[in-house]
Amino acid sequence: MRIDIVSIFPQYLAPVQLSLVGRAQSDGLIDIEIHDLRDAATDRHRTVDDEPYGGGPGMVMTPEPWGVTLDRLLRPDSLLVVPTPSGRRFDQRTATAWADRRHLVFACGRYEGIDTRVMEYYRPRVDLAEVCIGDYVLAGGEAATLVMVEAVTRLLPGVVGNVQSIVDDSFADGDMESLLEGPVYTRPAKWRGMEVPSILLSGDHGSIARWRRDQAWQRTRQMRPDLPPRGGTSSGPVPD
Ligand code: JFB
């Protein structure tokens, strides 16, 4: 997969070269390039913003440098991703769909956002996703892009070593009908007087699986009462 990221703060995206995503890149599984929008600005001050038509607070990103940059980066098979507080929610289902794409281009806005004509221009020309990562207000698209690149990259074949760890994840189905993950433990068996639940040391894999499912169910009800309960035999408290 190829990923291009456009921002006026290219250094903000530097962490993408670290950790999971950085290793996927050095393993040749993804190819990420970060581009400075100001490289496409033509004036002496490399201006990328202007006052909003109709008045109001703040500044708006001017369309010209976006047009120059995106014309150069976009291909017929690209998905253009524009993070915006007024977009559709990005969730695990979105990440799964994007993991099948050949080319993602992230357009990180700042200020009050990008002149709407940029999205209008590219919508009929490439696949366009205007997305929001959650109901809180960020100062620009960069942090949202880091989140989305990590969520997509870890789904690519070979990036996460253990395939089961992906399918077992909270929200793995993307339909929000899965359970949250329950508690995890490692050595030492006793830490500051606290013991690991004895069932996990029992070697009884059937009982361990049932206990874990019950823990996950309890945690889901506690932390996320908004999640729909799932039918079938795989959820609900374990009967006595
Ligand atoms: C994304 C952004 C701004 C207008 C503009 C560009 N979940 C999210 N919250 N905020 C953003 C986001 C996502 N994805 C987001 C891109 C931009 C915020 N801003 C600042 C804030 C409020 N209204 C500019």
Image (spheres, rainbow, N blue to C red):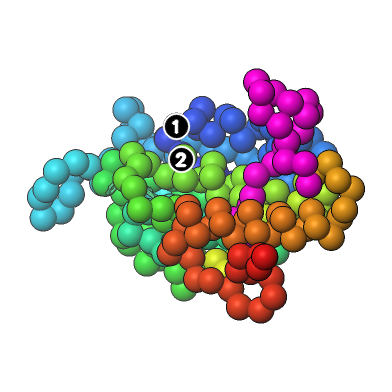
Is residue 6 rendered to the left or right of residue 44?
Answer: right
The amino acid on which the numbered mark 1 sits, given as a three-letter code, is Phe
Report the magenta residues as a range. Answer: 178-199
Was residue 220 drawn as part of the magenta stretch in this picture?
Answer: no
Report the side of 41 relative to 217 (left or right): left
Q: Position of residue 8 (x, y in %)?
A: 42, 35
Name the residue located 76 percent from the left edge and 33 percent from the top edge: 186
The answer to whether 214 is drawn above or below residue 62 in the figure is below
> In the picture provided, is 121 more to the left or to the right than 4?
left
Q: Quadrant of residue 19?
A: top right
Q: Residues within 10 Å of mark 1 (few under 14, many from 20)?
A: some
Q: Secondary structure at mark 1?
A: loop
Q: Which mark is residue 34?
A: none
Q: Residue at x 38, y 61 (%)?
A: 87
Of the image marks 1 and 2, the number of the one nearer the N terminus = 1
Q: How many marks?
A: 2
SS majority, magenta? loop
Query: Is residue 138 shown above or below 191?
Result: below
Residue holding disc 2: 142
Question: In which quarter of the view is residue 192 placed?
Answer: top right
Whether residue 99 is visible: no
Q: Residue furthest left?
A: 55
Q: Are marks 1 and 2 in contact (CB under 8 Å)?
A: yes
Kind of residue at disc 2: Glu
Residue at image mark 1: 9
Residue 127 at what x, y percent from top left? 53, 68
What is the CA distance from the residue labelled 1 to the residue labelled 2? 8 Å
